[in-house]
């Protein structure tokens, strides 16, 4: 009986110890309780239905305007599903698509009463291209109906009928069908169709589709898991500090900054090794290609690794509890990965999310990797993403050192 009582007493005190330790860690308590509430509210707001859908941005090129194509443009602009951005030439529109600055381009040319239309799309945005094609076809039919009732078009059609009758003679054998066919062509467009709308043309490179879904998915998952790796490195750094490593190093003539700097550099070097391993698998096993600038690709990898190191230093410099580091760091990693396009292409998110993504490292990492892999762009396309990642990493590293000094660590 006494042995059972002792066991229950020990069990009580062991449980009490863990409960007291948890409740005394205010940062950990906040992270454990508040973070699920914050993330739940955030995701609920994120997926709440919009009052109006986000319009698809469309680069619009008016190659050879006439009455028919102008009516088509006017009808297309009425649609709330698309937002036209005027572009001067077809080559300029293609360049915007190739760089990922526009998802779809519509090239309109006069075609008699109606308009001849070509639709071009970024290879990663075919879903939006299907939406645009539906809007384009609807605009073509509406503009054609408008042409039947428009006084100027009626006069044009009447003149065409008179010309056909005078030239053909409806009563002559074999001529009636030609006159009717000619009138239909006059009414419906130069090729006899209801305005020529070509199939969606996806931009290709070297005769093959440019988009590689594995390139995006491997890049996005690498971005996210390097953030989690930075969290683990920050927790290890706090464990070392708790064991007195900083006090022992401070006794040597090397300064207090060295342990913090060493932790950040180690995280960066390990992040580079992880990146090399992930892309080796992606390239060797899943057909991912570096079609663009190899130096640009390397710069983006370096920039992302530098951010991981700085992120780890900032967490360990400003947060004293490993549990709080886990909570706060994981919340940032999940939100940044989702909004920055690591999980799915950012264009699928609401417009306000796309605006927030500009401030997130994951957005710049995925953009830099896209530019240098499947988009096949040059070094200049990688410089901005790599530079922003490097600058953020350096800023966070400096912030982490300042935070540790403030805490007296």
Image: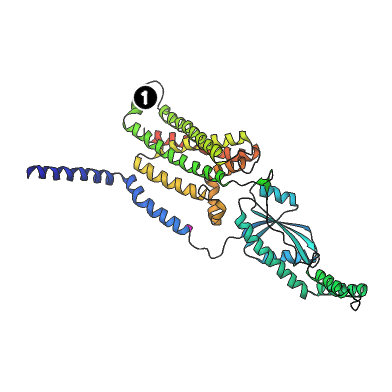
Residue ID at (48%, 31%): 269
Instruction: Between residue 4 and residue 47, name the one nearer to us.
Output: 4
Residue 390 appears in the rendering: no
Pointer 1 residue = 249
Residue ID at (36%, 43%): 324
As displayed, is residue 214 above or below residue 135? above
Q: Quadrant of residue 403?
A: top left
Instruction: Between residue 298 and residue 364, name the one nearer to us.
Output: 298
Instruction: Between residue 34 and residue 122, name the one nearer to us.
Output: 122
Where residue 71 appears, as percent x and y from the top left, is 75, 67
As displayed, is residue 275 above or below residue 251? below
Asked whether, in this view, residue 61 is left or right of residue 291, the answer is right
| Number of other residues with Cα within 10 Å of mark 1, as a class: few under 14, some 14 to 19, many 20 or more | some
Question: Magenta: predominant secondary structure element?
Answer: loop
Image quarter (top left, top right, bottom left or bottom right) of the C terminus: top left
Residue ID at (63%, 50%): 123
Where residue 305 appears, as percent x and y from the top left, is 50, 35
Where residue 249 appears, as percent x and y from the top left, is 37, 24
Looking at the rendering, the stretch of residues picked out in magenta corresponds to 46-50
Residue ID at (66%, 57%): 58
Asked whether, in this view, residue 116 is left or right of residue 33, the answer is right
Residue 180 appears in the rendering: yes
Q: Is residue 287 magenta?
A: no
Instruction: Between residue 406 and residue 118, name the one nearer to us.
Output: 118
Image quarter (top left, top right, bottom left or bottom right) of the N terminus: top left
């Amino acid at each position: 009986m006494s042995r059972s009582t002792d066991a229950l007493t020990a069990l009580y005190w062991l449980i009490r110890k863990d409960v007291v330790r948890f409740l005394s860690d205010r940062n950990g308590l906040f992270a454990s309780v508040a973070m699920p509430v914050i993330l739940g509210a955030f995701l609920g707001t994120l997926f709440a239905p919009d009052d109006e859908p986000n319009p698809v941005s469309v680069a619009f090129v008016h190659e050879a305007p006439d009455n028919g194509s102008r009516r088509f443009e006017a009808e297309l602009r009425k649609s709330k599903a698309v937002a036209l951005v005027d572009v001067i030439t077809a080559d300029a529109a293609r360049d915007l698509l190739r760089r990922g600055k526009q998802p779809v381009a519509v090239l309109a040319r006069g075609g008699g009463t109606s308009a001849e239309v070509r639709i071009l799309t970024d290879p990663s945005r075919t879903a939006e291209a299907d939406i645009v094609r539906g809007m384009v076809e609807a605009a073509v039919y509406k503009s054609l109906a408008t042409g039947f009732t428009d006084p100027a078009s009626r006069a044009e059609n009447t003149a065409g009928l008179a010309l056909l009758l005078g030239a053909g003679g409806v009563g002559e054998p074999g001529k009636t069908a030609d006159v009717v066919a000619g009138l239909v062509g006059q009414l419906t467009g130069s090729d006899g169709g209801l305005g020529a709308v070509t199939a969606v043309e996806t931009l290709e490179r070297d005769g093959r589709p440019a988009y590689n879904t594995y390139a995006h998915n491997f890049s996005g998952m690498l971005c996210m898991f390097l953030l989690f790796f930075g969290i683990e490195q920050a927790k290890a750094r706090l464990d070392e500090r708790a064991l007195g490593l900083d006090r022992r190093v401070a006794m040597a003539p090397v300064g207090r900054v060295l342990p913090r700097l060493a932790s950040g550099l180690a995280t960066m070097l390990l992040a580079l090794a992880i990146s090399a391993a992930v892309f080796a698998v992606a390239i060797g096993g899943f057909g991912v290609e570096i079609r663009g600038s190899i130096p640009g690709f390397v710069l983006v990898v370096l920039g992302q690794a530098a951010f991981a190191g700085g992120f780890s230093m900032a967490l360990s410099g400003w947060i004293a509890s490993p549990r709080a580091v886990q909570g706060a760091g994981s919340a940032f990693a999940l939100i940044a990965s989702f909004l920055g396009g690591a999980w799915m292409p950012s264009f699928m998110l609401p417009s306000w999310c796309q605006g927030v993504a500009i401030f997130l490292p994951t957005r710049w990492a995925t953009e830099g990797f896209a530019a240098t892999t499947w988009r096949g762009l040059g070094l200049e396309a990688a410089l901005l993403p790599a530079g922003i990642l490097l600058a953020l990493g350096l800023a966070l590293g400096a912030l982490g050192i300042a935070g540790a000094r403030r805490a007296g660590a």
